[in-house]
Amino acid sequence: MKAILFLTLVACSLSLPSSARADSQMVAANERVQIEVRVKANDDRKDLPKTSTDAVTQHKTLEISLSGKFREGDTRMVKWTAFGKNMKNDNIRALGTGEFKLALDSHGMSKGESKEITCSYTPEHTEVENAKGRARAGAKNANTGPRTKRVDAEGEKFIGYSVQVLDGTKVVGEAADPIGIGDKR
């Protein structure tokens, strides 16, 4: 059991970007800031004609909870980025980014929120085409089923986020879902 736990920890540390491993090892424990992110989602779906697929509009907000050691005159900054994927070519890009000053209370807790990120996409699907010009009913070898046409995916879909706490240029806390999303741009 201990061997499995050790191998899991080693695998997790190797999956982190090398810069994240180096920064987290260089930061003293009392300087680290813990980050917890909850994605608040509100999706709108619109039926597309001639198909069972919906066009989706996503509204996402990052609710960021922070904890660490309170410092008088704190200059640390929280930077967040929300990422999306282009549904046609799978390119990943930042949908929104922002920052705010870290303001831990006397208990070492703070909450912040991103602006609302909105994006829309339609997944790949098929549409039923009109069957005009088809063979008569009862004709030999008549294909009486409806014709379908493949429609490519389009738009951008929210796929994750990255949040960092910076003390000057030094990273003192970070969270991402999926891990390493900020490195894939």
Image: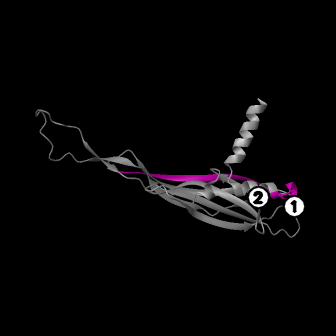
Left or right? Give the position of 96 relative to 148. Answer: right
Q: In the image shown, does 102 or 54 lie closer to the viewer?
A: 102
Disc 1 residue type (three-letter): Phe
Sequence-wise first label, 1 or 2: 2
Q: Which residue appears at 51% of the width and 56% of the height?
A: 85
Disc 2 residue type (three-letter): Asp
Q: Which residue appears at 87% of the width and 56% of the height?
A: 30
Residue at the spot of label 1: 70
Image coordinates for residue 126, horizontal then vertical, percent: 34, 46
Image coordinates for residue 50, horizontal then vertical, percent: 32, 48
Left or right? Give the position of 100 relative to 29. Answer: left
Image coordinates for residue 54, horizontal then vertical, percent: 42, 49
- The stretch in magenta equals 26-49
Q: In the image shown, does 117 or 164 lie closer to the viewer?
A: 164
Label 2, residues with CA under 10 Å away: few <14, some 14-19, many ≥20: some
What element does badge 2 sit on?
A: helix
Q: CA distance from mark 1 to mark 2?
A: 21 Å
Label 1, residues with CA under 10 Å away: few <14, some 14-19, many ≥20: some
Instruction: Please count the marks in the image.
Output: 2
Residue at the spot of label 2: 23
Which quadrant: the C terminus? bottom right
Left or right? Give the position of 40 relative to 156. Answer: right
What element does badge 1 sit on?
A: loop
